[in-house]
Image (spheres, rainbow, N blue to C red):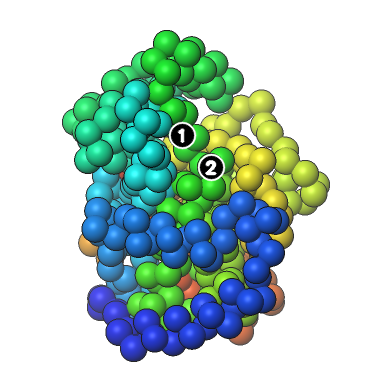
């Protein structure tokens, strides 16, 4: 297991960025976020976030037949990548906007990240949390000073209650993923990862609402146009895969997956990026996710939540291994998106 950091890539990335900026100068108009907004986000949040390490394992390389590079966002502040976007959004607000605080709805990681970023700025955070959110994530929200209002598990209930809280407080609403400031913050992962491992052919990213993969795709393809971006999604919450197949946003009447952080649907800002820049979506069963989590624990010695383990599940799956489109792609980046999980539930899943 090795931490990889390539210092010389900074200069090369800067050169590549200049070249690519000219090629994608219309992307802001097309998508709302681009490599420029992502670089601006990196400057804005650099003093607050952790630059997370990249780990490798010869055992997992042998199992996958590839060289795997794990970007450990489970080591990010708040325990997940969400702090990047939340931090960028909150520190983008002017003083008048920020004065009354911020409102969001989230199953846990975004809410905790927003509460932490708000605490750093000294403003209140009002968070709407579904009743089925993992206890460890709710504990994080409260630990960081977030003011919790409960909702039913459905997206509609979350949005309705968030609207009510918004009216009561006069605070600014920050959507967990359908916000260009959030997307730009998440995109800073690619800036770091391609500095640390410039030889990547593919990046595999969990997909839910699409904020993470949108930022990752925008930045990665601007820096390295040949790179492939693959989404990993639970079979029992496969709205993104259905959306790609249908050419429009598909929502599901319900989702039922162990990956509680991957139950949202694509948004109006994330869908065009997913449609255009995500090369494929690999769906995996919950049991495959659980097995991948076990491997992360046992081999990488890293604690990941189900959403964080899904990228490894995808690269080990037959849907990746037997797909000839990926046979010549040997250097795979995998985003371990978070590590917030209730251990009691986790052990139950392992036993089953």
- Residue 308: tell me if it is visible: no
Q: Is residue 190 above or below residue 79?
A: below
Picture quarter with the C terminus: top left
Q: Is residue 254 left or right of residue 121?
A: right
Residue furthest out toward the left: 143
Q: Residue extending furthest front?
A: 96
Cα gap from disc 1 to disc 2, whole angstroms? 7 Å
> Taking 324 as reference, is 231 above or below it?
above
Pointer 1 with pointer 2, Cβ within 8 A: yes
| Residue 174 image label | 1
Left or right of 49 in this view: 306: right
Q: Position of residue 132 (x, y in %)?
A: 41, 23
Q: Nearer the viewer, residue 99 or 158?
A: 99
Circle 2 packing at 10 Å, graded few (<14), some (14-19), many (20+), is many
The quarter of the image holding the N terminus is bottom left
Residue drawn at (39%, 15%) of the image: 169
Dot 2 falls on a residue whose secondary structure is loop
* Residue 324 placement, left or right of 115: right
- State whether residue 225 is above or below residue 136: below
Q: Residues within 10 Å of mark 1 (few under 14, many from 20)?
A: many
| Image coords of residue 56 (percent x, y) | 32, 75
Q: Is residue 54 visible?
A: yes
Quick one: SS at disc 1? loop
Considering every residue shown, the one lying at the far right of the view is 246
Q: Mark 1 or mark 2: which comes first in sequence?
A: 1
Q: Is residue 336 above or below residue 86?
A: below
Residue 329: which numbered mark, if any?
Answer: none
Residue at numbered disc 2: 179
Residue 305 on image: x %, y %: 35, 46
Would residue 25 be found to the left or right of residue 75 on screen?
A: right
């Amino acid at each position: 297991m090795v931490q990889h950091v390539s210092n010389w890539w900074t200069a090369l990335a800067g050169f590549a960025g200049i070249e690519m900026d000219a090629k994608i100068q219309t992307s802001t108009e097309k998508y709302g976020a681009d490599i420029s907004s992502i670089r601006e986000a990196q400057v804005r949040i650099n003093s607050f976030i952790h630059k997370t390490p990249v780990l490798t394992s010869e055992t997992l390389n042998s199992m996958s037949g590839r060289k795997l590079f794990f970007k450990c966002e489970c080591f990010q502040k708040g325990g997940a990548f969400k702090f990047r976007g939340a931090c960028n959004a909150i520190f983008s607000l002017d003083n008048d906007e920020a004065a009354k605080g911020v409102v969001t709805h989230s199953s846990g990681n975004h809410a905790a990240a927003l509460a932490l970023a708000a605490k750093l700025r000294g403003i209140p955070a009002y968070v709407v949390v579904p009743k089925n959110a993992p206890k460890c994530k709710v504990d994080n929200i409260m630990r960081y000073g977030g003011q919790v209002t409960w909702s039913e598990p459905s997206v509609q209930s979350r949005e309705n209650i968030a609207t009510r809280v918004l009216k009561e407080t006069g605070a600014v609403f920050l959507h967990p993923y359908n916000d260009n400031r959030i997307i730009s913050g998440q995109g800073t992962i690619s800036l770091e990862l391609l500095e640390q491992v410039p030889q990547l052919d593919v990046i595999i990213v969990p997909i839910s609402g699409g904020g993470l993969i949108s930022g990752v795709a925008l930045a990665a393809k601007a820096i390295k146009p040949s790179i492939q971006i693959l989404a990993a999604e639970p079979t029992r919450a496969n709205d993104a895969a259905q959306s790609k197949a249908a050419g429009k946003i598909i929502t599901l009447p319900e989702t039922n997956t162990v990956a509680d952080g991957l139950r949202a649907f694509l948004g109006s800002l994330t869908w065009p990026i997913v449609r255009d820049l995500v090369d494929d979506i690999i769906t995996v069963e919950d049991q495959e996710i659980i097995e991948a989590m076990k491997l992360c624990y046992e081999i990488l010695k890293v604690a990941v939540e189900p959403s964080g383990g899904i990228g490894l599940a995808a690269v080990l799956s037959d849907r990746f291994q037997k797909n000839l489109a990926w046979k010549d792609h040997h250097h795979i980046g995998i985003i371990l998106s978070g590590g917030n999980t209730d251990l009691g539930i986790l052990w139950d899943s392992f036993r089953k």
